[in-house]
Image (cartoon, rainbow, N blue to C red):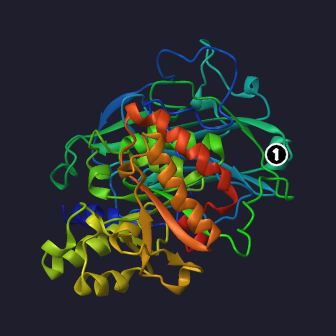
Amino acid sequence: MSSFRNLSRALAAASTFALFALAGCRDSGVTSPPGQDTTGTKPPATLPAAQTKTIAAPALSSLRSSAAVMATCAPPTSYPLTDGKRTVGSVSISNDATNIYVVYAVPTKYWWLSDSRLAVEKTAAAIPRDDAGQPAPWSFAYAGSHEPPVTSYTYTVPLSKVGVQAGGDVYFAAMGGVVHPKVESDAGLEGDWEWMVMWGLTSQSNLDPVHKYTIASCGGTTTPPPPPPTASGGVISITFDDGFATAFTNGYPVLRDLGLKGNIAVNPTPVNEQWGDYMKLANLNTLWAAGWAIVSHTMDHADLTTLSAAAMEAEIRDSQAWVKAHGFGPTSVFVVPFHSWGSREYATIQKYHTFTRGHTIGEFSPEKYTPLPVTATPMDWYAFEPEFAPYRTAAGRALTMSKVKYAVDNGKYLDLMFHRIPNADAAAFKQLMTEVAAYKANVRTWRELVQ
């Protein structure tokens, strides 16, 4: 039993392996990943090769990961690893000048990858099929039996083997055999386990496991980063505090369509416990892969000034560790809940982070903005909250834009801070972001500024 307890304790450590950016989609109004297929056929009503069976507890001795450290030519395209009911990880595909990389990652507690099957072909028709025309994973060219089970696994497929170059398309299907104890706790590690088939799917509601991927160019033809602000120009960032679901469903598509990116200051506890009003891990993976920044905001959104010194430090330290462990860092940025902090909190935050946003410009008279470069005052960043302008009104949008224009014209830095984006305010939010997009050359994420 002690080996299984050690395994459980090792799980948190194993998740710190440096997985490259993973992304996924869920069935909550999310658009499909770019490059998703495909074959022009209607997605199946059920998963191919669907299997679930009870097995004995595997003989696990340690957790392993084959996540490679790689420099790819573009951010990966990722899909949730799911059986259509439960998502436990991701499957991501990317490439460099010579290889295609397909990474399976299962960061969910008490879940592991024990088998993997991968097909990467030049045409969709070349992917092995069964008599019903569905992908037949047991005939795929790439197969792995992972003993002991692993938290991640990377396949490296030479471009020359598939016969494609930059700009060409490949089709792929990725199946994973995952295992977990039926009782998802330390107490269940030696009881009955389940082995089941999961696929890298477009979403939980779209069960098509075949996807098209366009080989990214390493020759400089990929989308260049935005130009730096002019010498006299300021910098604007767009941040969504807490990680509410509507920031993903109503905020992300607007920014994406306008060519903008933002920041998420995330509270991990609602993500870990899958609270209904908050983003899922797959949503954060999608944002990270799209170039967004994901930073610390305490585990539980506690008012730090009300906590003991030990509890306060745990909130600050553990939230940063969570961000790093899920491949979203390292993060040097901390956002203070409720703008509530004093000298004790300041010193503890500074112990773990370099940059802190803890004020709004309206807290001071006259208004105070952060000077550039942002490294000049790393613990003294300022935000403006358009939702209290409010941005749902024309007057509120005009007020927000006056703050943006002042920062840009005077070479200052300003963070536009949002929380929820309710459906009723979605149109007004889009209008405001359309106006902000006029300053696209001045908009940066914290990844681009300081991470």
Q: Quadrant of residue 226?
A: bottom right
Query: Residue 166 appears at what percent x and percent y?
Result: 85, 47
Q: Quadrant of residue 96?
A: bottom right
Crowding at mark 1 (Cα within 10 Å: few <14, some 14-19, many 20+):
few
Q: Is residue 19 above or below residue 203?
A: below
Instruction: Name the foreground residue: 262 vs 380.
Output: 380
Helix, strand or loop at label 1? It is helix
Vertical placement of 93 versus 205: above or below?
Answer: below
What's the residue at 42%, 81% (across, down)? 379
Considering the image in quadrants, where does the C terminus appear?
A: bottom right
Q: Nearer the viewer, residue 326 or 171?
A: 326
20 relative position to 122: left or right: left
Q: How many marks?
A: 1
Q: Amino acid at mark 1?
A: Lys
- Image quadrant occupied by the N terminus: bottom left
Q: Is residue 238 visible?
A: yes
From the viewer's perspective, is 431 left or right of 94? left
Q: Residue at the spot x=47%, y=53% of the render? A: 399
Percent position of residue 393, x then y? 43, 40
Q: Nearer the viewer, residue 398 or 354?
A: 398
Q: Which residue is the site of mark 1?
A: 161
Q: Residue at x 44, y 55 (%)?
A: 150
- Residue in view at x 49 percent, y 72 percent: 330
Q: Which quadrant of the view contains residue 442?
A: bottom right
Q: Position of residue 38 (x, y in %)?
A: 69, 25
Can residue 81 be seen in the rendering of this structure? no
| Near-viewer residue (285 or 380) | 380
* Residue 101 x/y as whole percent: 67, 52
